Each structure stands twice: as C-alpha cells, then as structure tokens.
Amino acid sequence: MTETIAITEHTVDLGGRTLSVVEAGEGPGTLVLLHGIGSSARSWTDLLPLLAPHARCLAWDLPGYGGSDPLDVEHPVAADYLAVLDRWLDVERVQTCVLLGHSLGALIAGEAARQWPDRVAGMVLADPGSGSGLSVNEPWPDRLTSRISDLQALGQPDFAAARAPRMCAPGAPEHARAVTQREMARVKLPGYAQAVALLAQADLAATLPHTRCPLTLMVGSDDIITPPESVRRLADQRPDATYLELPGLGHAGYVEAPALYAEPILAMLERVR
C-alpha cells in the first residue's frame, strides 16, 4: 500500500511578520521550495508527494503572496527577500538545506547560495529567470511594467486567464493548465509589484559565478518564458553545473509532469546527503 503523504498549510510568526508555509515530509535532509512570480506554495502540491519521502519539504508563499505579509520596501532586491528567508529557516531550525528555485525563485536561491555557502548544500534552479540587472532609477521596459498595470486594470481572474496559458506546453494536461491559472489568480498587490522589482533588478548570470554548491539547472524544452537557450547561457556561468532539458514540458513542468521533474531534485538530495 502506498503511504499517504501529509501536506500541511500553516503560518509562521517571524517576530511580527507572518509567513504562510506548506510543509511535507520529515527528513533526513531539508528541501526549501521557492516559487515563481505568478505562483504560490500551493502550486507544489502535485510534486511534494514524490519528494517528501526523501526530505523535509518547506515551501513558502513569497512575501506579499497568499497569507505572507509583503516586504516593507517598495522596490526590493534579493537581499530583502533573503532577510525573511533567513528568519524563517532559523525558526524552522534549518541549518543546511537544498534550495529549489523556480523562475523568480531562482533569483532568490542564487543569492542565498552566494551569501550562505555553509547553509546551502545544493541548488536546483528550474526554468530560472535571469533578471534584467537594472537600477531602480533606470527606466524599466514595458514587459516588466505592464505586468503591474495589467493586474491593476484586469483584476486577478482576468489577469490570470490572459497570462497563465503561456506557463504550459501545448500538450500539457488540462489539470496543469487549471492549477497554473488558479494559482496565478491569487497574486495581489503590493506583493506582485515587489516581485516585479526583484525581476527588474536581479542578475542571476552575475551571481552564479560566486556560488560554489552543487548546482543543477533544468528547463522544459517547450518553455517559452525562460527558453532553453537562456538557461544554457546561465549554465555557462558555472561550467561544473549539470544542465538538463526536460522533453515536452513548458515553464510549469512541476505540474505538467511531476515525476519527470522530481528526478533531478531527488538526485541532488542524494548527492549532498
């Protein structure tokens, strides 16, 4: 009989700041899951049963998402998110972990690995965003600013209906399409605008050469948001990294084909154990 994996949702008090969390599994190691700009901790639900037998899995709602309080900074950088991540891991008594950063979450994971070489034992960057490396004082391109204006103009449901279909590959299961649209419909301001600021200012290509933990970069072969060629360029910054293309998957591979997606993550957990 297959063991049922308990997945719990709860909030954590970080000294006056609330963080909403999804958790599954008990160890021996810890995997911390950092979702993308149009998603949430709940979006990992199909993947967690495959990972939880092998590690304690902790997934946050990014500050400003779900039940998590937004940051106090209008235009945050990765270090602002890291301050919350640091407090959370301390509360959870996590000394070392593997980070799984999807899309925007890869920007936070990369900076964590750079700043915390003794805490981040390994890192999987999945369909990673590169960031634009812009200053807050520089004009931001329309592809960034329109994210915020579209959410304001359309409202959450229509915003998700317009943008979420790009997350999945053409042949993705209907369930995957429904999950990505459902979770994108939960994004809200100011958290989403703060995440756009991170996307504008971060530069993952400049960060990766300063990391030293074992690294896997993977991307869906049909990802049109962070296409394979962009992820290959990131992999060039760490010639020792493992680079993988997952056939037939789009940007939201973790809901399109959880079993295929889980394999590189489990390999990283085994590698650093």
Image (spheres, helix red, strand yellow):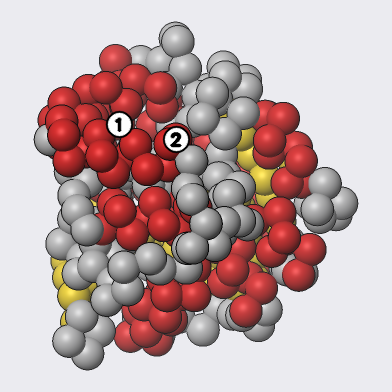
Callout 1: SS? helix
Q: Amino acid at mark 1?
A: Thr
Q: Kindly identify the residue that appears in the image at 57 percent across and 72 percent down.
A: 112
Q: Kindly identify the residue that appears in the image at 27 percent across and 76 percent down.
A: 72
Total labels: the figure holds: 2
Determine whether 31 is above or below 205 in the image: below
Separation of marks 1 and 2 at Cα, in angstroms: 20 Å
Asked whether residue 138 is in view, the answer is: yes
Asked whether residue 8 is in view, the answer is: no
Looking at the image, residue 267 sits to the left or right of residue 183; the answer is right
Task: Specify which label sits upstream in the sequence, 1 or 2.
Answer: 2
Looking at the image, residue 105 sits to the left or right of residue 40; the answer is right
Q: Which residue is mark 2?
A: 143
Q: Work out whether residue 76 or residue 173 is closer to the camera in this orientation and state it.
A: 76
Q: Residue furthest bottom?
A: 15
Looking at the image, residue 123 sits to the left or right of residue 31; the answer is right
| Among the 4 quarters of the image, the one containing residue 75 | bottom left
Task: Find residue 85 and report its horizontal and vertical position in percent.
Answer: 41, 75
Q: Amino acid at mark 2?
A: Arg
Q: Which disc number belongs to residue 180?
A: 1
Q: Kindly identify the residue that appears in the image at 16 percent across and 34 percent down.
A: 153
Looking at the image, residue 220 sits to the left or right of residue 136; the answer is right
